[in-house]
Image (cartoon, helix red, strand yellow):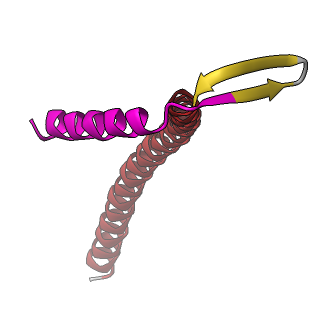
Amino acid sequence: MTGLLIIILFGIGFAYFATQNTSGVTIYADSYVFSDIPLYVVILGSLLLGILLASIISVVNSLSTYFILRKKENTVKELKRTVAELIKRVHLLELEGEKRKEGNNQKELDESRDTL
């Protein structure tokens, strides 16, 4: 609703501006000459061209950001996978260390029994 209201207000403002600036303007573009174009058309055309160029630049920037974020997300996934694998390996090594410790303790107990 507010968007519609803003558009209506801009339309009314531009209509008033257009009625006040109807004088003809001549535009020279290299060998082309456009004569008696109303001033408000030139201003509106410039505004629309600016909006179009800004939109194109914004889309390119958004696509660039999307690809950068996608690459970083893939890197994060890969690193999380690596961390999970390393945690599993550490856990297995801890279990192996505990088994060896238990085995050494058992050997010491057996040796101490044998000496008695």
Q: Is residue 106 above or below residue 67?
A: below
Q: Position of residue 59 (x, y in %)?
A: 52, 32
Residue for point 72% across, 28% down: 26
Residue for point 71% across, 20% down: 35
Residue for point 26% across, 83% down: 116
Residue for point 50% across, 32% down: 40
In terms of depth relative to the viewer, which is nearer, 83 or 28?
28
- Kindly indicate the quadrant of the structure image that contains residue 5: top left
In terms of depth relative to the viewer, which is nearer, 36 or 103?
36
- Quarter holding the N terminus is top left
In terms of depth relative to the viewer, which is nearer, 9 or 77?
9
Q: Position of residue 14 (x, y in %)?
A: 36, 36
Q: Is residue 61 above or below residue 91?
A: above
Question: Could you tell me what secondary structure mostly forms the magenta stretch?
Answer: helix
Q: Position of residue 83 (x, y in %)?
A: 43, 52
Residue furthest toward the right? 31
Residue furthest toward the left? 1
How many numbered dots are placed on residues in this image?
Answer: 0
Residue 16 forms part of the magenta stretch = yes
Q: Image check: 103 left or right of 86?
A: left
- Kindly indicate the quadrant of the structure image that contains residue 94: bottom left
Q: Position of residue 63 (x, y in %)?
A: 53, 32
Residue interval drawn in magenta = 1-25
Residue 41 forms part of the magenta stretch = no
In terms of depth relative to the viewer, which is nearer, 61 or 3?
3
Q: Image check: 95 left or right of 20?
A: left
Residue furthest toward the bottom? 116
